[in-house]
Structure formats: C-alpha cells, structure tokens
Amino acid sequence: MKKPEILVSVPSDIGAQRLGTSLALDALFVADAERSNPVLKKFPVKVIASYPNKRGEVGPYAQGKYAKLLSELNNNTAKEISAIVKNQYPLIISGDHSNAIGIMAGVREAIGANKKLGVIWVDAHADLHTPYTTPSGNLHGMSLSASMGYDNIELSRSTIDAGLKPFWEELKHCGASRLTPKIGPEDIFFIGLRDFEIQEYHLIRDYKLNHYSPYDVKAKGLTYILDQAVSYFKDYDAVYVSFDVDVLDTSVSTGTGTPVYNGLLLAEAKQVVDTLKRLKNIRLWEFTEINPLLDNNNSMSKAVIELIDVLMED
C-alpha cells in the first residue's frame, strides 16, 4: 500500500468567510510536536505561494469574492500540484476548499486529458454553487462546480456583474491546458453530505451524483458505503480524496468555519481514512478547512493528526 511521500501546504484562506485556515499547517505541527511519536516531521514539506496579505481586497464582485486573486492563485497551484503528482503522492493541507479548484486542475494536468479522474468528497457541503447561485459569494462553496465547468444559470439567484465573468471562466479553465471540465458528475462520490441549498440539490438529483449522508451511514452502515466507493473507483486511472473537516460532528469539528451537526464521529472518520487509503489508484489526499483561530485547545488539529496516523499506518 502506497503512502504519502511529501507534505504540501496550500494555505490560502481568502475563499472562505472567516480567516484562519491559512494557519492549519502550523497548528498541525504544534499538535504533532506534543506527542511522543510525531508523524509530520517524517515528511519533506513544500508550501505553495498564497496571498495572506491580500485579505480585505475583496474586490467589487459580491457573487465571487476574491475571484481575480483566486484565479491567479489556483492557476499557480495547478502548476505546482501537477509537477508534484507526476512524481510523488502528496498529503495536502489546504486552507479553504476553494484551493481544490487548482488542486483538481493539477491532478488533471498530471494524468492527462483522456484519463479517468475520480473525486471522493468527504464533506458536509456539496460545494456545487456558482456565482449565479451562491448565497454568500465565497468561492470555497463553488469548487466542484468550477471543476465541472458548471454555471447552473437555470437556477440563478441574481444577475452577476459582467466584470466577474472572465474570472469565473478563468477558474473553470484553470490549468495550463485550459481544459474544462476536469471531471464529470459521474466522477464524484460524496460521503457525509448533509448541508446544501436547493440549487445544489437540483444538480445532485438531476445528474444522479453519488452521495451518502450521515443518515445513510446509520441506515446502511459505513462499511457498506465505503465498499461502494472502493468498488466504484477501482477502474479509474486516478483518485483524489478531499477530506473537509466539517464532515465531522460538531463534537469533534470545533476548529472549522462551517460546522454542521450530525456528522461523522472520529472513530468513523478513521474508518473512512483506513478504507479509502487502500485504493491502489489514489494519487493525492487532502485535508482542508482546519481553522485554529476558531478552535479550543487546538482540538481540531489533534483530531486530524490522528487521521494522518491512520493514513500512514500499514
């Protein structure tokens, strides 16, 4: 079983409502250093350039905050991730989930346009909004739609500013090849999904996206759902696992900006990691949305370190 070989930080937090996720890697190193057998010091570390000094320069676009900056940042991320994935299996600690646009583009660049790329989205949220449907304007809720090249204009809430459109197009075409879409609806598998708006629900329903909520976990069993995921992606050329910590129950996910009750318990999350890590075609693993500024006693980072332990076990 292959294990992650390099620790990569993509620290931008400007795609989220609340700052702090840019500090995730530092918080993880603090949590890890308090243990008798630290795991993170075993990794070489690469930090991808971010814009921590740009918060506040939100720009004029209410339906796509920081869209210009995020289009630049994600294009840079795609270039960096592509180079890494071609040679190594990275463990990525990203700030907010808008960074997944560049990460997804990077994996796609690395494997080529004609290969099958699967995405396991372990998250309380669908992240299927667009500038046309967003209730907040935060890009971390649009990462999957951007990667699928979707606008969802049919269910739009409002007309977007004409100046925003080229930056949204840039995000959809993220990466050197300008390829869109990076993935199709059939390439996504949601685990833990439970908080989404009607516009996202229509996409989930109409495109028959694979999705399992915590209610499904209770009704069908976590082992059944994970077996479904492993079986579904067994013939894919590459798999990207993105684990948003708000998939965890609020009793665990204290340090994140968008907690949602009735999530996975830590023992269940460990089972998720232990099962999915055995996919032979996995190319990259991501933990995202860890926010130590919202935490108490760095509890979120301590929980994630336990999950990384599982990821690195034989």
Image (cartoon, helix red, strand yellow):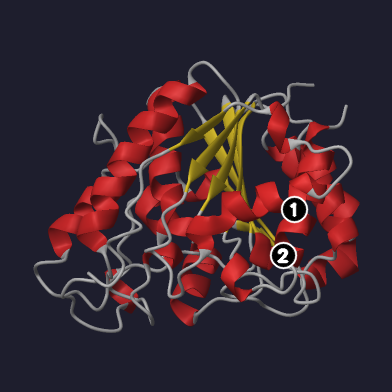
Q: Indicate the secondary structure of the residue bearing disc 1.
A: helix
Q: Which mark is first along the chain, 1 or 2? A: 1
Task: Indicate which disc residue 194 carries.
Answer: none
Front residue of this view, candidates 290 and 235: 290
Front residue of this view, candidates 256 and 112: 256
Q: Residue at x 74, y 21 (%)?
A: 2
Disc 2 and disc 1 in contact, CB within 8 angstroms: yes
In this rendering, is residue 111 above or below 228? above
In what quadrant of the picture does the C terminus appear?
Answer: top right
* Circle 2 residue: 298
The residue positioned farthest toward the top in the image shown: 87
Is residue 96 visible to the viewer in this orientation of the structure? Answer: no
Q: Residue at x 45, y 70 (%)?
A: 19
Is residue 278 visible to the viewer in this orientation of the structure? Answer: yes
User: What percent of the width, then of the height, locates residue 267?
Assistant: 90, 57
In what quadrant of the picture does the N terminus appear?
Answer: top right
Q: Is residue 257 left or right of residue 50?
A: right
Q: Indicate the secondary structure of the residue bearing disc 2.
A: loop
Q: Amino acid at mark 2?
A: Asn
User: What percent of the width, then of the height, locates residue 34?
Assistant: 81, 50
User: What percent of the width, then of the height, locates residue 165?
Assistant: 16, 62
Q: Amino acid at mark 1?
A: Ala
| Distance CA(mark 2)–CA(mark 1) | 7 Å
In this rendering, is residue 20 above or below 275? below
* Circle 1 residue: 31
The image quadrant that residue 262 belongs to is: bottom right
Q: Residue at x 34, y 57 (%)?
A: 150
